[in-house]
Amino acid sequence: MAMREALKNMMRRKTRTMLTVFGITIGIFAFTVMGSMAEKISLLVSGGTDYYKDKVTVSQTDSFIVQPPMSTSKAKEIARVEGVSQVSGTVFTSLEEKFDEVSLGPPAAIVATEFNSIPYETFKITYNGRALKEGDNGKVTVGTDLVKKLDAKVGGSVEIRGKNYEVVGIMNKTLTTPDNEVFMTLHDAQQIYYDEQPEVIRAQTKPSDIVNGFTVYIKEGNDPNEVAKSINEQVKEAHAFGPKDFEEQIGKATGIFNAILFGVAIISLIVGGLSVINTMTMSISERTREIGIKKAMGAKTKNILAEYLTEAGLIGLLGGLIGWGLGALVITLVNGALEDSGNVIFLLSARISIFAIAFAVVLGIIAGFYPAFHAAKINIVKALRNE
């Protein structure tokens, strides 16, 4: 009964109803798009947190982003620190020689590490094909987000920095940074990284002697954060990062960014909620006599309340479905357009979708509660006298 009356009332003022639905639509559209961007960023951070949870990384600077060259001999100093089980030299550099793309996530990268890390690594990646192994110079594995960009397939070849490499594996999706990375042997990555250096550095060293970081694996029973502190105290010209440092430096920054994204969406939703209040209030003002007649004929307060709350909920549901649909369409189009560059910036997850639509319904009901309560409490005599 309440549903039928609500639908009939919505159709009385089609234009007004659609404008109100549009207000909800804008809010849910903003929430879906912004929330999907925040979801992608959160998963990247979550993957990084999972990767760093049981190890320490060492670079020459106190930044995860800027990593100048370091001598491979530094590994021996790090290995002498108490609690260190294994030290692996790593190279991390941009996939493109000249990186000029705007990216809201980590840029496409070349990654390499020594194979002595394999027995200690707990962050596991599965492959279509296989992982790299010792002696695989001239071969690579490719992250899923870069397959289209590099036109990669197992058994084929890809061009990186002007040289062709055989693809031995495509990494299965991890929803974090490896999706946007190419893994190669340390030998190959060292040559690329060496070629990037100024002439003055190249004249003083050779490719096999430089890396730009170390991954430190910790002996069982030791706290990675304490080991990182010991490395900083005992090893000169080295900055060690434990799991806590990653969370503080990366997690807080992305937390602020996500708060801004959701803040914009929430403001849009508030505007949508106000439009529901306005529409429901005007609707009740126009139907005061009708409400009085219904109450005179025996309609109870709960019946009037249910009718108007149902109407508000339906407006929220309709606006939510349209807003989510438009958001999903935009996300699909943008991700498709950016797929060639490997810079997929949205992740429309099931929880974002369900929450967006459910929140639209709840928002409509909450926004419509006061007008509905006011309608349910209308005095019968005054209502019947209303023209």
Image: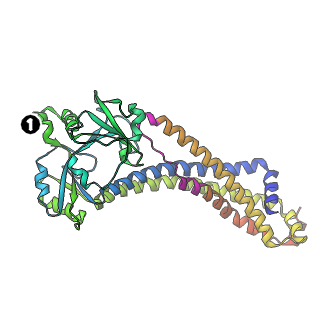
* Quadrant in which the N terminus is drawn: bottom right
How many circles with numbers are drawn on the protein? 1
The residue drawn where x is 67% and y is 59% is 364
Residue, disc 1? 204
| Left or right: 332 in relation to 229 | right
Residue 345 colored magenta?
A: yes
Q: Image height check: is 37 above or below 296?
A: above
Number of residues whose C-alpha sits closer than 10 Å to that of mark 1, classed few (under 14), some (14–19) or many (20 or more): few
Q: Image height check: is 36 above or below 206?
A: below
Colour scheme shown? rainbow
Q: Position of residue 385 (x, y in %)?
A: 90, 67
Which of the 4 quarters of the picture holds residue 203? Answer: top left
Q: Residue most toward the left?
A: 204
Q: Which residues are magenta?
A: 338-356
| Left or right: 23 in relation to 178 | right
Which of the 4 quarters of the picture holds residue 68? Answer: top left
- Residue type at the position of mark 1: Gln
The front one of 100 and 354 is: 354
The residue drawn where x is 30% and y is 37% is 140
| Left or right: 330 in relation to 69 | right
Q: Position of residue 336 (x, y in %)?
A: 50, 36
The residue drawn where x is 41% and y is 41% is 144
Q: Position of residue 354 (x, y in %)?
A: 58, 56
The front one of 49 and 248 is: 49
The front one of 33 and 94 is: 94
Q: Position of residue 322 (x, y in %)?
A: 65, 47
Q: Image height check: is 58 above or below 377?
A: above
